[in-house]
Image (spheres, rainbow, N blue to C red):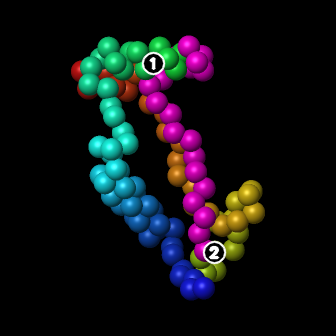
Amino acid sequence: MVSYAVSPQLMSKIIPETCLAINKALKDEYLKFPSSAEEWKQIAEEFQNKWQYPNCVGAMDGKHIRITKPYSSGSLYYNYKKYFSVVTSMRELKVEQLILVF
């Protein structure tokens, strides 16, 4: 097994670039965005009815991505699941954030 020391600064550059590349490659196949204000409102209604969360049109959970322990990182990347990881962020979109689109 090979281990590389990766600084947090480098990770903060690599992760967004990787996410953008994945998004670019897969978005047309896996992400369909509503094309009208009415479609956005319908999604918000579904969130309200199912989760009692008003004005929300999307949500994404956090995800631990397992990594090899970076050299000299101590417990910096060690998680409660008892392995080393980086975590994607949780994001939610509210209708108010999308009003400018229309």
Locate residue 87 relative to residue 41 in the image: left or right: right
Q: Amino acid at mark 1?
A: Ala
* Left or right: where 74 falls relative to 89: right
Whether residue 20 is visible here, answered yes or no, is no
- The foreground one among 92 and 1 is 1
Q: Is residue 59 magenta?
A: yes
Label 2, on which residue? 69
Secondary structure type for disc 1: helix
Q: Position of residue 15 (x, y in %)?
A: 44, 61
Q: What residue do we see at 45% from left, 18% from top?
A: 44
Q: Amino acid at mark 2?
A: Lys
Pointer 2 and pointer 1: residues touching (CB < 8 Å)? no
Does dot 2 land on a helix, a strand or a loop? Answer: loop
**Going by the picture, which residue comes out furthest to the front?**
29
At which x and y percent is residue 97? 37, 26
Please give left or right for residue 76 compared with residue 81 in the image. Answer: left
The residue located at (37%, 55%) in the rendering is 22
How packed mark 1 is, by other alpha carbons closer than 10 Å (few <14, some 14-19, many 20 or more), is many
**Tag shown at residue 44:** 1
| Viewer-side residue, 56 vs 9 | 56
Residue range in magenta is 49-68
Image spot of residue 81 (x, y percent): 74, 58
- Residue found at x 51% / y 73%: 7
